[in-house]
Image (cartoon, rainbow, N blue to C red):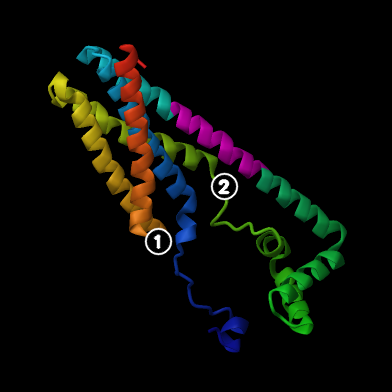
């Protein structure tokens, strides 16, 4: 707890506490990318292998899937997060304009927010006045709109994280094509992919602070379902999928 002397002198302790929500942006992109890299590439490889394709055809399909998937993930994440960033910029401009044209209304609005959070009217008014005198725009963005620097949308970072993690995930089943006999590719790719998905599910749960079994089950279920379906399609039609 800060003392009055610390506040008045500006000698405040550093706030180095870290929260899991600060990782949500890159964590979401990284987990989604790695999961999609493993599931989509492994499923593609299993489907093609089930159609009795040659090793070269399976390898080409896997590499093509890696390149196309990584670019698709990067583009999709960039567009999605850019839209979020555009919205945040628009809100920032709108809030700045409102502060320039109607300061008193914005102060009253902030006061009402603090009252709704439990402060009495006098204290809420005092807090609103002092915070707006310090940094009105940042205060309103944070307390009125929930926008903070830690949660700010970063399109390039999200796109890079998605593409890089997709590539890392996709490389693993591709390596199996090169290292195991042709007749064992389906089993090897499926086994490696499931192990990696279990590790990925556990890791994401640990980082996010969620229940371990929940992260593992939800990521492996969909991975197994995808590989089973594509293997069925490849075996049924006998063509590359």
Residue picked out by circle 1? 209
Q: Are marks 1 and 2 in contact (CB under 8 Å)?
A: no
Secondary structure at numbered mark 1? loop
Q: Position of residue 31 (x, y in %)?
A: 40, 44
Q: Is 18 left, or right, of 86 in this rendering?
A: left
- How many neighbours does mark 1 have within 10 angstroms: few (below 14), some (14-19), or many (20 or more)? few
Residue 113, visible in the rendered structure: yes
Q: Residue at x 25, y 26 (%)?
A: 174
Q: Position of residue 126 (x, y in %)?
A: 75, 80
Q: Is 37 left, or right, of 178 in this rendering?
A: right
- Does residue 60 belong to the magenta stretch? no
Q: Main secondary structure of the magenta part?
A: helix
Residue 60 higher or lower than 122, as above or below: above
- Pick out the residue farthest to the front: 236
Secondary structure at numbered mark 2? loop
Residue 229 higher or lower than 49, as above or below: below
- How many neighbours does mark 2 have within 10 angstroms: few (below 14), some (14-19), or many (20 or more)? many
Residue picked out by circle 2? 153
Q: Residue at x 37, y 31 (%)?
A: 226
Q: Residue at x 82, y 70 (%)?
A: 108
User: Which of label 1 and label 2 is nearer to you?
Assistant: 1
Residue 164, visible in the rendered structure: no
- Front residue of 222 and 38: 222
Magenta-highlighted residues:
71-86
Q: Residue at x 34, y 57 (%)?
A: 212
């Amino acid at each position: 707890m800060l003392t009055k002397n610390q506040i008045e002198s500006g000698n405040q302790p550093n706030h180095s506490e870290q929260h899991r929500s600060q990782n949500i942006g890159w964590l979401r992109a990284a987990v989604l990318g790695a999961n999609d890299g493993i599931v989509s590439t492994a499923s593609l490889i299993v489907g093609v292998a089930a159609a009795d394709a040659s090793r070269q055809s399976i390898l080409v399909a896997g590499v093509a899937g890696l390149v196309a998937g990584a670019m698709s993930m990067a583009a999709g994440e960039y567009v999605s997060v850019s839209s979020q960033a555009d919205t945040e910029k628009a809100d920032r401009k709108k809030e700045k304009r409102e502060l320039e044209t109607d300061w008193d209304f914005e102060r009253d609005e902030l006061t009402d927010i603090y009252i709704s959070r439990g402060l009495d009217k006098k204290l809420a008014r005092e807090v609103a006045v002092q915070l707006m005198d310090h940094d009105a725009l940042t205060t309103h963005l944070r307390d009125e709109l929930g926008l903070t620097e830690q949660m700010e949308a970063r399109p390039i970072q999200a796109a890079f994280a998605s593409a890089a993690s997709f590539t890392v995930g996709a490389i693993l089943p591709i390596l199996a094509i090169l290292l195991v006999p042709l007749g064992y590719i389906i089993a090897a790719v499926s086994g490696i992919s499931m192990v990696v998905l279990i590790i990925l599910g556990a890791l994401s749960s640990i980082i996010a602070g969620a229940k371990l079994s929940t992260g593992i089950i939800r990521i492996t279920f969909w991975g197994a379902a995808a590989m089973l379906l594509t293997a069925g399609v490849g075996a049924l039609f006998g063509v590359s999928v």
